[in-house]
Image (cartoon, helix red, strand yellow):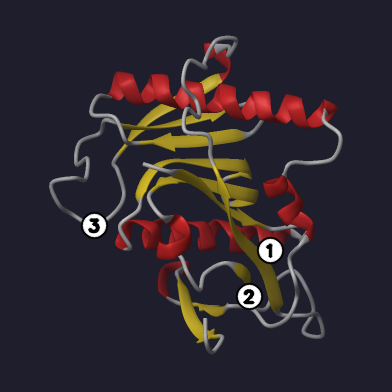
Amino acid sequence: MSRSWVQISAGRGPIEVRRFVARLAERMEALCQERGLVVVDVTVHGDEDAPASVEILVEGDARRCLEGELGTHALVERSAARGKAARKRWFAGVAIHAAAADAGAGAGEGVDLGELEISACRASGPGGQHVNKTLSAVRIHHRPSGITVRVADERSQRANVRRGVERIAERLAERAARRVAEGEAARWSEHDRIVRGEPVRTYRVGRKSALVVEEAREGR
């Protein structure tokens, strides 16, 4: 089955946009599950409450399932840290990029386990026999890089820890490759492609800080 990265990016936006990215990533993860995609793991780049970007690795036809969600998303919310005259619309981007079929396979060597914070968590998503209802899902935070992954696709906690360490090793290797590569990989260039205006979705903040769709562009 094909795998893809669903990327939610703040671009070069300020803290308000990064907070929006955290909320938008939660919505996109839930949407992936609702539309039949298998969420393999989630990678957070930066502070979990205000990341620069979040990448969701999914199995299935992501472009078909997320049709109408790709592009710029806008949040209408005033910032408590800014005056009333400041702008109140914050823009983030959603994009999809193909993932290698063997992403993470055989990786994990070279990661210092002492630099990891590992904790158990429950798998998210709607109920059903395919959802891991035990605490075998894991969250792994790599302190030096700020990368956090959440893995729930394996049945045992030990297997999920191994897979999570592989994911972190893969992301670290990608970062190192980008430093020496000429130019940036396609999905990283999305940070500079966020268009302010004509968003595919516009939101306001509802109860418990959840995003509420206020407006969707016609024909999307």
Question: Looking at the image, is 24 positioned above or below residue 191?
Answer: below
Q: Which residue is mark 2?
A: 74
Residue sitting at the far left: 129
- Work out whether mark 3 precedes mark 1 in sequence or the reverse, and give the earlier one: 1
Q: Residue 106, percent across and down?
A: 48, 15
| Element on which disc 1 rests | helix
* Amino acid on which disc 2 is placed: Ala
Q: Nearer the viewer, residue 82 or 149?
A: 149
The residue pinned by badge 1 equals: 17
Front one among 33 and 118: 33
List the residue tagged with mark 3.
126
Q: Residue at x 60, y 58 (%)?
A: 95
The answer to whether residue 1 is above or below residue 36 is: above
Q: Nearer the viewer, residue 215 or 115?
A: 215
Identify which amino acid the numbered label 3 is placed on: Pro
Horizontal arrangement in the rendering, residue 215 relative to residue 53 (left or right):
left
Query: Seen from this angle, which residue lies furthest bottom?
Result: 218
